């Protein structure tokens, strides 16, 4: 759904003027964070790339390196994330998830379950160019079992298109036979069906499954599977039902309770700001007793908060 983001390209845009404004904001004693964050949140990602190029042409310096040396903490992480192209942001997020201390399964699941087929193909290509590594091999080396199998299927980016009317009932029956109906679980059936059918088809299968079993598919997955496999299957089901609702829930979970999962908050706010953040805001308001704007406001502070709220783009109180 095009144009459901909160960040839009600015008309009357001049990359050289913006590069100068940023240069002045960072020159001399102290940094004018307000200027930096207001300017960058008011530009689309494509425009930020042009500003980066103009900055290097005019000053012989890398804008991202300059921003890193002037900013600090969570604000720096957020602004640097905004300066990456969408595909590079996903690629570096996945690389860090794989290569960090321990594997960050949450990041692998969030990105691979929610991106479109074309986005996944682009990620695989860019990952290879950037690191001279095969993403599938790197993922396979870090995780195992049925969880690995499901991630490998998602990396094939090969879902069927449209709804296969003839197999809705048999898919629902196969899922029922693989889980609730038998002792133990046939995980392979869950992996094959949830990994390969289109979102539209799966929504019809979930309805048929509910009629057949009396359970929502999510309830059965919770009961029948565990660990990484359970988490990725639930993410795939939620994304098949509604990608914005899935991200609204991820954002809520990143802020609820004590402490904030800032990495997730930043990743979703930046990566969805030009895609579907308006829809995410609407889903958030529908599902939780507060607005996304309000929750961010209460959960963050300073220039970091200001930047997140500018990306959020409005309150749905």
Image (spheres, rainbow, N blue to C red):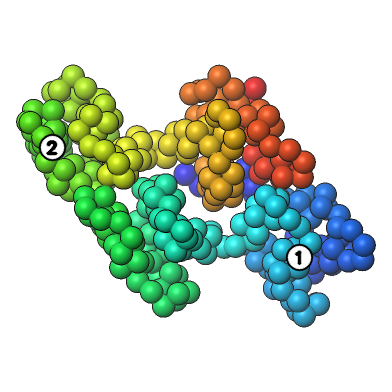
Q: At 27% across and 31% down in the image, what residue appears?
A: 222
Which disc is residue 254 wearing?
Answer: none
Residues packed near mark 2 inside 10 Å, few (<14), some (14 to 19) or many (20 plus): some
Q: Are marks 1 and 2 in contact (CB under 8 Å)?
A: no
- Front residue of 310/299: it is 299
The image position of residue 11, as x and y in percent, is: 73, 55
**Tag 1, which secondary structure?**
helix
Q: CA distance from mark 1 to mark 2?
A: 53 Å
**Is 69 on the left-hand or right-hand side of 145?**
right
Residues packed near mark 1 inside 10 Å, few (<14), some (14 to 19) or many (20 plus): few
Q: At 16% across and 43% down in the image, what residue appears?
A: 187
Task: Count all numbered tags in the image, as a single digit.
Answer: 2
Q: Is residue 18 visible?
A: no
Which disc is residue 69 wearing?
Answer: 1
Above or below, 273 against 208 in this view is below
The image position of residue 178, as x and y in percent, is: 11, 36
Quarter occupied by the C terminus: top right
Q: Quadrant of residue 117?
A: bottom left
Q: Residue furthest front?
A: 101
Q: Quadrant of residue 70?
A: bottom right
Q: Is residue 73 visible?
A: yes
Above or below, 271 against 13 in this view is above
**Tag 2, which secondary structure?**
loop
The image position of residue 113, as x and y in percent, is: 36, 48
Q: At 71% across and 40% down in the image, what residue appears?
A: 305
Q: At 39% across and 36% down in the image, what residue appears?
A: 242
Residue bearing the label numbered 2: 185
Q: Earlier in the sequence, mark 1 or mark 2?
A: 1
């Amino acid at each position: 759904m095009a144009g459901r983001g909160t960040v839009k390209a600015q008309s009357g845009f001049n990359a050289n003027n913006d590069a100068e404004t940023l240069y002045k904001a960072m020159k001399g004693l102290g940094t004018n964070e307000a200027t930096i964050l207001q300017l960058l949140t008011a530009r689309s990602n494509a425009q930020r790339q042009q500003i980066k190029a103009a900055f290097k042409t005019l000053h012989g310096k890398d804008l991202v390196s300059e921003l890193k040396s002037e900013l600090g903490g969570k604000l720096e992480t957020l602004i640097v994330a905004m300066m990456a192209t969408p595909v590079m942001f996903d690629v570096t997020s996945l690389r860090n998830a794989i290569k960090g201390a321990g594997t960050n399964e949450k990041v692998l699941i969030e990105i691979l379950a929610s991106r479109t087929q074309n986005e996944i193909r682009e990620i695989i290509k860019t990952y290879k160019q950037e690191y001279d590594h095969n993403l599938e091999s790197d993922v396979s080396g870090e995780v195992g079992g049925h969880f690995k199998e499901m991630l490998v299927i998602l990396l094939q980016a090969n879902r069927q298109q449209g709804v296969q009317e003839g197999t809705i009932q048999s898919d629902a029956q196969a899922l029922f036979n693989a889980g609730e109906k038998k002792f133990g679980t046939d995980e392979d059936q869950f992996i094959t069906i949830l990994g390969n059918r289109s979102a539209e088809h799966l929504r019809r299968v979930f309805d048929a499954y509910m009629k057949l079993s009396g359970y929502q598919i999510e309830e059965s997955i919770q009961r029948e599977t565990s660990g990484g496999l359970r988490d990725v299957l639930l993410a795939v089901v939620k994304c098949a039902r509604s990608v914005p609702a899935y991200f609204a829930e991820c954002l809520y979970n990143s802020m609820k309770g004590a402490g904030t999962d800032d990495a997730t908050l930043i990743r979703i706010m930046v990566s969805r700001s030009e895609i579907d953040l308006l829809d995410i805001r609407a889903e958030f308001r529908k599902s939780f007793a507060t607005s996304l704007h309000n929750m961010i406001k209460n959960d963050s502070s300073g220039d970091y908060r200001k930047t997140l709220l500018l990306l959020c783009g409005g309150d749905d109180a």
